[in-house]
């Protein structure tokens, strides 16, 4: 009886001892596995940080067990959390702190992420082979044509004739589209009949005071302008005395002058240079023919001249076909590495 009881108690003790041994062995094996995994994951984290540090705009500084990471907001970090390592995260302003603890709860690694705004990438400035300035004359009869030109999202300049039915309105609309607009000042040409029908024209027999008065009246009709060119004007611009009288007055108003070169004998450009007024001149007219294909050919010729000479100013006129042709050639001009600019960009 006692022998059976002793045997039963011994068996229970043996089971308990074996169970305790098993648990101890199991715990030791688990500890070893977790320690191994902890070391492995710490190594993986350090490798991840090395990869992160190689990215543009990322800087990492290590002090003890703390990694301080400076990086752009939105950068993919790629940090991990496993059974061996548990992460505690806190965010304060542009700083995120991540504390990694092992399975015992002991601190193993700290990563502090400092986020800054992305640094804008500024592309290198394009170097063009030449500058092309296109000046569209004779604005003023309507505003509808301004809307057609408004579809051209490039620098184009315009010149408004004063005293036409829509001079002021068309000027304002073109400015709203972002275009540069100057005064297209009527000056006496070789056609007496046309001269007589042109309101506000400057005539060779006018006194200095009369020239000043008409010039001021023209500006008043179209609004303040910082530059002007001549409408017609072959008879007026050939007269050096008259041009000097006009340009001195314009200089006092700090206006530049574009010589339309309606005559080979013009004194406009040379007189402006003599007086120290910012100036330039027209080298080609784009729409002597108003056919779209002919205008496109003229634009191609102007592009070649811009590349050969470095810069050029050409003149077209305020009509639908001119707008349509120019819009269709914008990509061609860009592809030829020629920069389309306002007239103010070619002044001397």
Image (tube, rainbow, N blue to C red):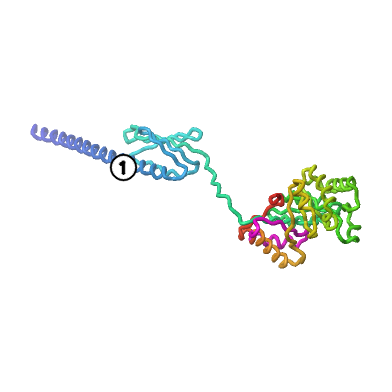
Left or right, 95 with respect to 270, comes to: left
Q: Is residue 72 above or below residue 329?
A: above
Q: Residue 179's x, y, as percent?
A: 72, 51
Which range is magenta? 307-331
Q: Nearer the viewer, residue 117 or 45?
A: 117
In depth, the one of 86 and 141 nearer the eye is 141
Where in the figure is residue 153, as x and y percent of width and height? Answer: 68, 54
SS category of the residue bearing label 1: helix
Nearest the eye: 25 or 42:
42
Residue 50 is one of the magenta-drawn residues: no
Residue depicted at 24% across the width and 40% down the height: 29
Q: Is residue 226 visible?
A: no
Q: Is residue 3 above or below residue 198?
A: above
Q: Which residue is mark 1?
A: 40
Q: Where residue 119 appears, x then y in whole percent?
A: 52, 42
Quarter assignment of residue 150: bottom right
Q: Quadrant of residue 26?
A: top left
Q: Is residue 323 magenta?
A: yes
**Number of marks in the rendered image:** 1
Helix, strand or loop for the magenta stretch, by majority: helix
137 shown above or below 14: below
Task: Tell me the residue at 75%/61% (across/down).
Answer: 285
- Is residue 248 visible in the rendered structure shown here? yes
Mark 1: give few (<14), some (14-19) or many (20+) Cα within 10 Å.
Answer: few
**Vertical order, 304 against 20 (above or below):** below
- Residue 341 percent across, percent down from the top left: 68, 53
């Amino acid at each position: 009886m006692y022998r059976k009881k002793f045997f039963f108690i011994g068996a229970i003790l043996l089971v308990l001892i074996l169970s305790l041994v098993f648990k101890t062995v199991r715990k030791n094996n688990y500890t070893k596995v977790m320690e191994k995994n902890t070391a492995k994951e710490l190594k993986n984290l350090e490798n991840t940080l090395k990869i992160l540090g190689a990215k543009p705009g990322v800087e990492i500084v290590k002090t003890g067990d703390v990694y301080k990471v400076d990086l752009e907001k939105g950068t993919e970090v790629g940090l991990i959390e496993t059974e061996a390592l548990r992460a505690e995260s806190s965010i304060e302003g542009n700083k995120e702190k991540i504390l990694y603890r092992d399975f015992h709860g002991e601190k193993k690694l700290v990563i502090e992420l400092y986020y800054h705004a992305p640094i804008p990438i500024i592309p290198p400035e394009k170097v063009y082979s030449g500058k092309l300035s296109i000046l569209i004359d004779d604005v003023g009869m309507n505003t509808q044509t301004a809307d057609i030109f408004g579809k051209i999202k490039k620098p184009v300049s315009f010149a408004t004739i004063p005293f036409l039915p829509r001079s002021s309105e068309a000027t304002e609309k073109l400015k709203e589209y972002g275009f540069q607009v100057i005064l297209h000042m009527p000056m006496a040409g070789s056609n007496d009949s046309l001269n007589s029908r042109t309101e506000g024209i400057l005539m060779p027999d006018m006194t200095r005071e009369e020239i000043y008065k008409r010039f001021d009246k023209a500006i008043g009709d179209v609004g303040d302008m910082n530059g002007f060119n001549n409408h017609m004007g072959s008879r007026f611009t050939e007269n050096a005395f008259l041009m000097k009288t006009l340009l001195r007055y314009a200089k006092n108003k700090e206006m530049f002058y574009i010589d339309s070169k309606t005559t080979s004998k013009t004194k406009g450009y040379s007189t402006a240079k003599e007086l120290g007024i910012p100036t330039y001149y027209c080298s080609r007219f784009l729409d002597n023919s108003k056919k779209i294909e002919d205008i496109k050919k003229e634009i191609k010729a102007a592009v070649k001249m811009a590349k050969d000479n470095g810069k050029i100013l050409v003149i077209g006129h305020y009509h639908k076909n001119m707008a349509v042709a120019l819009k269709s050639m914008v990509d061609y001009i860009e592809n030829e590495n020629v920069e389309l600019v306002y007239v103010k960009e070619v002044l001397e």
